Amino acid sequence: MQHIAQTPVFILCGGLGTRIKEETEFKPKPMVPIGHHPILWHIMRSYRRCGFRKFILCTGFKSEVIKTYFLNYASMNSDFTVDLKTNHLTVHSIDHDEDWDVTVAYTGENTMTGGRLAIAAEKYLGDAEHAAVTYGDGLTNANLKAVFEFHLEHGKLGSVLGVNPPSRFGEIRLSGNDVIEFSEKPEFTEKWINGGFFFFKRNFFTHYLSKHEGCVLEKNPLVKLAEDRQLNMYKHAGFWACMDTQRDRDHLNQLWASGQAPWAPSFLGVETIECPTLSKKP
């Protein structure tokens, strides 16, 4: 039996973000801001709203930016006094409501996603029987507590959030050369793609991953897991977005500025989802 608040959430934060180079030349992609906060902060808030509070950030490229952000989080979000002679710092109040337990783990400059997870899990999975995994560039309004419960209930090694692929182009249906239907950016409700939010049993980390820097999560580990019939999908038809390009970044910033960000608690109308201790059903 594992309490949701003690379930580790591994967030992959080490990639180069080459498709959004104008932002990632001096910072890792998870630190690209959406509003006044990096997208990483928004992702962690989404998990915390559902009861998770233990985060392991698998860093690489520009890891010092993430380390500095969290080392200075209290002082940057609170009033403080510093004695410049002794460098003694007094924080007068904690002017934020984050109660997260954050581990910043350096997993190599050029390590791929599977290798990063294996390196971090060996050190920080602890005795947890289950763990969450996600990327540092995706947002959703999915109830991650419900996804975790789904994972516990079906009993397989892995679960993935499945989402409908977004369309950026209009679709035209033809009969011969006659246009019979014109659909502007249709929703592909019968197709599913990897939404990048996972839950795994601990055996996945030890039996399917390798600490080799070339180990790619999305290749052999997940392919083998699917071949072994040990991966289930939780279907989510709601909001999902991935920040791959500057256009994606601009779209997410527009949503946040409008007050209509689907992943935000104020938009969802809830601050916290009550999360009791979860156990696998018999």
Image (cartoon, rainbow, N blue to C red):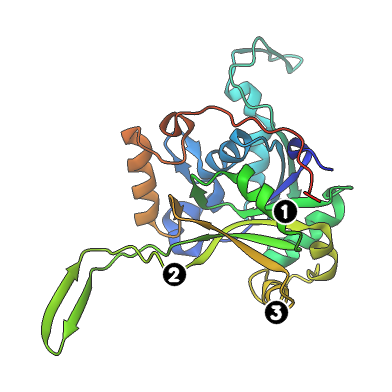
Question: Residue 261's x, y, as percent?
Answer: 39, 39
Which residue is more in the foreground, 14 or 102?
Answer: 102
Identify the residue position indicated by label 2 in the image. 191
Mark 1 falls on what kind of element? helix
Q: Nearer the viewer, mark 1 or mark 3?
A: 1
* Residue annotated with mark 3: 227
Depth check, front residue: 135 or 184:
184
Q: Is residue 201 left or right of residue 171?
A: right
Report crowding for label 3: few under 14, some 14 to 19, many 20 or more residues within 10 A (C-alpha): few
**Image x and y of residue 205, in percent:** 80, 62
Quadrant of image for the N terminus: top right
* Mark 2 vs 3, N-terminal side: 2
Residue at mark 1: 153
Q: In this view of the protein, can residue 112 be seen by the observer? A: no
**Residue lying farthest to the bottom in this orientation:** 176
Q: Secondary structure at mark 3?
A: helix
